Image: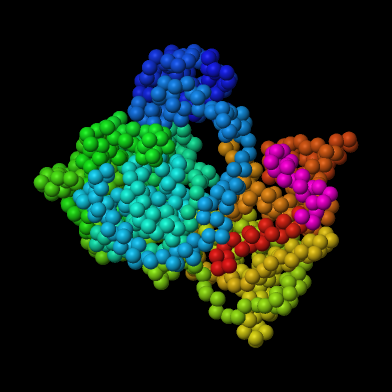
Amino acid sequence: MAFRTVVPTQCASPCRTRIWGSSLLLPVAASGLLLDRARGPSYRLIHLFHAPPSQRQSTPSTFSYPSCSFSSSLVVNQSPFSVPSSSSFLQNRTFATEADAKSQSQSNMAESKCPAARFMNVGGGGTRNRDWWPEQLRLNILRQHNPASDPLGKDFDYAEAFKSLDYEALKKDITAVMTDSQDWWPADFGHYGGLFIRMAWHSAGTYRVTDGRGGGGQGQQRFAPLNSWPDNVSLDKARRLLWPVKQKYGNKISWADLLLLTGNVALESMGFKTFGFAGGRADTWEADESTYWGGETTWLGNDVRYADGNPGSSSQGVVDSDEKHAHSDIHTRKLEEPLGAAHMGLIYVNPEGPDGNPDPVAAAKDIRTTFGRMAMNDEETVALIAGGHTFGKTHGAAPSDNVGPEPEAAPIENQGFGWVNSHGSGKGPDTITSGLEVTWTRTPTKWSNQYFEYLFKYEWELTKSPAGANQWVAKNAEEVIPHAFDSNKKQLPTMLTTDLSLRFDPEYEKISRRFLENPDQFADAFARAWFKLLHRDLGPKSRYLGPEVPKEDLIWQDPLPAVNHPLVDESDISALKQAVLQAVPDVSKLVATAWASASTFRGSDKRGGANGARIRLTPQKDWKANNPQQLAQVLGALETVQKQFNAQGNGKQISIADLIVLAGSAAVEKAAQDAGHNVSVPFTPGRTDATQEQTDVDSINHLEPFADGFRNYGKSTPRVKAEQYLVDKANLLTLTAPEMTVLVGGLRALNANWDGSSHGVFTSRPGTLTNDFFVNLLDMSTQWKAAGSDDVFEGVDRKTGAKKWTATRADLVFGSQAELRALSEVYASADGAEKFVNDFAAAWTKVMNLDRFDL
């Protein structure tokens, strides 16, 4: 996306704002530009990147607003990509409608106000560092959710508060809300069930298995950007309907839990038997900045996430059952990782079909990809779509240009409400949400198998909603579908393009027909898939709270066996430390093994970690980052120690999971002692060993690191530098910037690189826990230069030119990035050695215990 540097001629300081457009795009002949006429006496220039790099340049232009005149130049990306000449593509990249452009404008340009106004001359305003240096390494995601911003205080224990909750009374109050229709937002069919199911689904459904981020575990639907996503229109109303319940029960129920529990209660209130429910999701109090939602700068854009592959046919028309493979050979676009949605601001896919093309077979490809990113297989996908669409309706009473700005862009008097609708009453029968107007069954407030009955009973004809969106209507059908607000009206059965995917995709069709013929299988599959949807990011079963926790262990929960033996005591721990150091004298190998085991943890979805010792199982034992040959040697030695200890006959046992962590901690203590520091690394037994049968290989593979700067594994990519991967990894490990810093310095001193390389090992005594990494990194007698690779560098003596060290970007960033250098100086100081050792031991212990939810 191009950016325009705007210098108001009547303003005192420069500002920068993103280009936005409206519906009229005028090509400027042979210039590589498009002139975009906006509302009012103003024009904008959009630079196209199809010109070769040698011809790309900043192009000056002049245009005006009613409030001030501007001179501007275009600033373009360094990475070229091809752009088709069609204006439809450009509108897809910018805005489909003028209303969308008005809503998107982050600088009130849609109201013809000077964009410089957004640079407020108060604290927190003005041009930011990121404006000057967009590629600056930012550490903000390591400072999120600070206890200082939590109004409940550091001593508040949500789990204990939840246990004091009158759970059944809460459910009864939620059930009462379902049919208590409010004049300010009337309930469809007299029941809010469909709305609340969508609310819960859209809270949990942002989860993606690739990095574990998203999901409903933090109640993030309350904050930007999720509270203003185009796919979340009207969910602001759903949450307000629940406020009296939240207000009544206060801190005993978090918003994160309440949003999801309400979806469960909605299903039950409409006759569906759910699989269960677990609480335990503590609220956060600010927007999560760690989640990458995509690189597009327009709502519903997808040009960045689908930069590779072919989007498929643009022709419109029904794909009949005898043409199941139509277009499938050319629909090859690839969704970038870690994303789980086909468009910026959508939960999954465009319900009209890929980029609005109503092709059910092509849409099935997008569905399979996006639901797969959410860890759902084909059966779970079919069950979720069909089960969810058994209830409620979509809303498209009129075109979207009747809808006002989203909550984050709405005026202050709206008090957090967005999407104010000027069509008719703006609510009830006049509601506009997706622009689609579909009711799937004749009993939209009761559980049934009618979704599949109608899907296969009728042939379907492409039509338009009142808002102009592509949808489907049953041929030769009777009007049997109820109207949401007029009991005297009936309508024809309707479906979405993505509904028809469940019939016309060959694999989905098999499952759908089985569910049609076996309603009990469908009900069970939906119950299980819905439970998985709501709980995928809650972590292991040990975190589950409440009276409705299912007894059954599910493979996606990464189950662990219970402890069934006495645990080791302090004397045993001391003896085991000596035994492991005798079995593996190289402390570097013990540290590397413990780190490889524990650092699989992801704070995003509470998966991974040392508990279970899955590092000894497929697939972790074969991951490149774990140095399989060295890992096998260390594990073999530790297993020998384990067998000898467990054979003593006193009943006490130690798991391999515990022994891996204990060995790593013993190595840290030994390395500190060798450096002249006595430090005790806390150890708490209680981990157990998972079996291969308890391990879903495909699911666990998502924990494999693409890069782990803590052990100097992985390299930069064209889009992400190695140091950015390091910060991302630190965030998943819930580390602060100081913790990240001290761990990297310590692991380098301990010679714990994944492959045994010397990169970043700035010490003459590797394997000793010293602050040498920081001392030598900041030594001005060393000059650094690239060593034939953007990721590897050589440090040479400034005077002699003699080679002293080698390093990666994950090493040198601690001397180049100002904040990290400041932290490094603390540990490099003359009085920093002891602090370094103590801080390393504390951070190490934190990582080893990240998955010990029992502590």
For the point 78% across and 62% down, the residue is 671
**Among the 4 quarters of the image, the one containing residue 452:** bottom left
Compared to residue 573, the image places residue 308 above or below, namely above
Q: Is residue 310 magenta?
A: no
Q: Can I make out residue 366 in this image? A: no
Residue stretch in magenta: 812-835
Q: Nearer the viewer, residue 835 or 630?
A: 835
- Give the percent coordinates (x, y) of residue 841: 71, 60
Q: Nearer the viewer, residue 51 or 303?
A: 303
Q: Is residue 834 magenta?
A: yes
- The quarter in which the C terminus is drawn is bottom right
Which residue is at the far bottom? 649
- Give the percent coordinates (x, y) of residue 640: 68, 75
For the point 43% across and 43% down, the residue is 226
Q: Can I make out residue 151 in this image? A: yes
**Among the 4 quarters of the image, the one containing residue 793:** top right
For the point 49% across and 61% down, the residue is 158
